[in-house]
Image: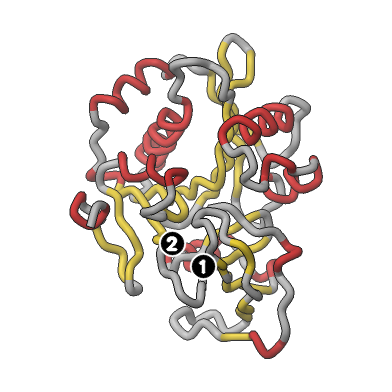
């Protein structure tokens, strides 16, 4: 899910809330002021932010993700909008996943990419690729004007176990993915890829690759962030079988009737 950025986090002590359903008494939770929603036009969003960041260890973060939280850089948050509950945290249950025909084509098309794992560090190739991706796929979405500092703050700062995955074709960088390691799975933080190659399906392949990594690591879930039914940006998540959503505090299967209801 897109993140509004720290300039929206104008908070007062009166907005402090305690998250009673997680026994993490050392953490505090602040509710932000309203800010423009990144996904639904003419709506305002609010977020609940977990602080302080230095107390959110990988173990604590894994527990927070189970309760619908996600991170953007070192900000850990979950949607808490006044009149909207459209953001549904989703994850793929690895043991039940079977690729459909289109996904199998994507895997066959891109499975020869050279994949390497790295620590969270910047490389000269990343930001130009990030800019091309934002300007092509998410023009006027807010992130297409990110400065190098904003990009690094968003993707390359973390207080949990994170890694950068590079996908190259004949040495040319095609895609970059940031992934967090959790106690019960992987969390797909963000992926950007070369948007100007006709017929490519890098995004689908990336999710399939992360599913395979979960299998190799014997992890039961791949967390995909938030799904919003009315958002075309989120529609790709509906294509992955065995999708579960966190609704009313319980992870439950999102079958076709739930998705299209």
In this orientation, which residue lies closer to the viewer: 142 or 101?
Answer: 142
Q: Is residue 199 visible?
A: yes
The answer to whether residue 27 of the structure is visible from this angle is no
Q: Which residue is mark 1?
A: 79
Identify residue for label 2. 87
List x then y, in percent, for residue 126.
70, 30
- Mark 1 neighbour class, 10 Å CA radius: few under 14, some 14 to 19, many 20 or more: many
Relative to 111, is 211 above or below? Answer: below
**Rendering colour mode:** secondary structure
Report x, y in % for residue 69: 51, 65
* 222 or 31, nearer to the observer: 31
> To which quarter of the image does residue 45 belong?
bottom right
Which is nearer the eye, 182 or 253?
Answer: 253
Question: Where is residue 136, by image quadrant?
Answer: top right
User: Neighbour class for label 2 at 10 Å: few (<14), some, many (≥20)?
Assistant: many
Q: Which residue sits at x=43%, y=24%?
A: 201
Marks 2 & 1, CB-CB < 8 Å contact: yes
């Amino acid at each position: 899910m897109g993140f509004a950025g720290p300039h929206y986090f104008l908070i007062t002590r009166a907005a402090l809330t305690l998250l009673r359903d997680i026994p993490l008494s050392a953490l505090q939770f602040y509710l932000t002021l309203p800010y423009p929603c990144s996904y639904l036009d003419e709506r305002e969003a609010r977020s609940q932010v977990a602080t302080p960041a230095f107390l959110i260890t990988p173990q604590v973060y894994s527990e927070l993700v189970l309760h619908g939280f996600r991170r953007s850089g070192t900000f850990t948050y979950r949607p808490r909008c006044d009149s909207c509950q459209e953001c549904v945290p989703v994850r793929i249950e690895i043991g039940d996943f079977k690729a459909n025909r289109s996904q199998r084509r994507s895997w066959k098309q891109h499975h020869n990419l050279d994949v390497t794992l790295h620590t969270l560090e910047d490389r000269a190739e990343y930001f130009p690729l990030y800019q091309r991706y934002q300007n092509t796929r998410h023009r006027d979405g807010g992130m297409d004007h990110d400065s190098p500092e904003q990009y690094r703050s968003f993707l390359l700062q973390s207080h949990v176990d994170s890694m950068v995955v590079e996908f190259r074709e004949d040495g040319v960088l095609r895609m970059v993915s940031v992934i967090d390691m959790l106690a019960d799975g992987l969390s797909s933080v963000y992926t950007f890829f070369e948007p100007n190659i006709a017929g490519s399906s890098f995004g689908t392949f990336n999710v399939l690759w992360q599913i395979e990594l979960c299998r190799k690591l014997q992890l039961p879930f791949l967390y995909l962030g938030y799904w919003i039914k009315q958002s075309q940006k989120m529609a790709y998540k509906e294509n992955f079988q065995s999708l579960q959503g966190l609704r009313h505090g319980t992870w439950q299967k999102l079958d076709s009737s739930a998705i299209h209801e």
